Image (cartoon, rainbow, N blue to C red):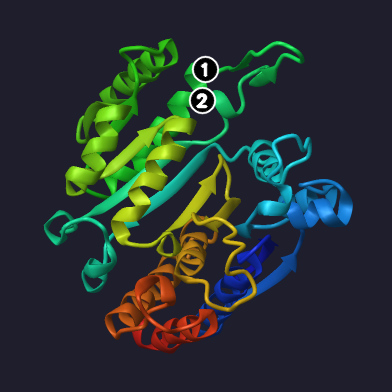
Amino acid sequence: MKARIVLLPGDGIGPEVVAAARAVLERAASLFGHELAFDEQRIGGAAIDATGEPLPAATLAACRAADAALLGAVGGPRWDDPRIVVRPEQGLLAVRRELGLFANLRPVRTWPELADVSPLRPDRLVGVDILFVRELTGGLYFGPRARERDGDVERAYDTMLYTDREIRRVVSLAFLLAAGRRRLVTSVDKANVLESSRLWRQVAIETAAGHPEIRLEHQLVDSAAMRIITAPGDFDVIVTENLFGDILTDEASVIAGSLGLLPSASLGEGRFGLYEPIHGSAPDIAGAGVANPIGAILSAAMLLRHSLDLAAEALAVERAVDAAIAAGARTRDLGGVLGTADMTGAVIDQMAAHLVH
């Protein structure tokens, strides 16, 4: 097949890990006989420096014309002043909004060989395989008049607004994904306090009625935060609203032992998806060639699966990552010595041995 992929390296270590993911995608294309065309565009701080905008029109147009986009990271200390009006993160929020990317998928799983780098006890890591489905275009991030601070008055506010449709589409996706997994959906809300959460719970219950083969459980966000650390193996698919999802997925990332290991996908109604590792721009190690590329590489695997419908190719990448880790490949954050390029090479070297046709 032929496909067009936009590369959005962004800031900090973003260009390094995107280059690694591209190399893996090119290897997959070679092994399976596909043609992938890549188009590099600016986003975030790099785009602000070059054009004055965090999401230039050319970048958005390129994404609209592509099958998928692969993002590195945005942001950094030079743009962190809260008084700055134009910020790198605005580019990411804008591309989600403009392309209707309403669901963020974040898988969290563990590798037995990396049990020693997780802060959790080894017995709590057994069998952990969670898929977070975070609503991405509503809530506090995108509500009308979502945020404002009165000029001379010490007062600020944010608005959490959800519609039935916004909730239903993301919860429905969670049930669809759970059907191919262990058939459990945990809906996380704060229904004992928030009216928007009461609507969320109502819609979740209504959606579950159409999926009698899948079990639905409700969890308040504070108790969910505790259970994710004390009993992560109890979860299958967790679906929640935007802010809760942002916080809980960052919390859950420590289970695997490093932010550098975990991928994500942002999906909408159609084929296009935006794929990125969950880590930030890590300016302290940018340019040093030591960033862990696994999160970006596994994001590329999600790209193959969800946007290009290439399940065998995605599985080959994922199995190659598993094999490289099992063989002892480790970057610095995992207690090893490999740099970004060598870790990428270790994965690529395993790919031909893990083809699934």
Residue at 19%, 57% (x, y): give it.
125
Q: Is residue 357 above or below residue 251?
A: below
Q: Position of residue 118 (x, y in %)?
A: 27, 61
Q: Position of residue 179 (x, y in %)?
A: 28, 44
Looking at the image, residue 274 sits to the left or right of residue 297; the answer is right
User: Which secondary structure lies at badge 1?
Assistant: loop
For badge 1, the amino acid type reads: Thr
Looking at the image, residue 64 sits to the left or right of residue 24; the answer is right
- Quadrant of the image containing the N terminus: bottom right
Total numbered circles: 2
Q: Position of residue 192 (x, y in %)?
A: 30, 13
Front-lying residue, 308 or 281: 281
Residue at 81%, 51% (x, y): give it.
48
For badge 2, the amino acid type reads: Glu
Q: Is residue 40 above or below residue 135?
A: below
Looking at the image, residue 193 sits to the left or right of residue 104; the answer is left
Residue that label 1 marks? 163
Q: Which mark is residue 166?
A: 2
Q: Is residue 286 above or below residue 158?
A: below
The image quadrant that residue 308 belongs to is bottom right
Residue at 69%, 57% (x, y): give it.
66
The image quadrant that residue 119 belongs to is bottom left
Front-lying residue, 145 or 180: 145
- Is label 1 in contact with label 2 (beta carbons under 8 Å)? yes
Give the distance between the C-alpha atoms of the residues marked 1 and 2, in whole angstroms: 5 Å
Q: Residues within 10 Å of mark 2 (few under 14, many from 20)?
A: some
- Quadrant of the image containing the C terminus: bottom left
User: Which secondary structure lies at badge 2?
Assistant: helix
Q: Position of residue 2 (x, y in %)?
A: 64, 70
Q: Residues within 10 Å of mark 1 (few under 14, many from 20)?
A: few
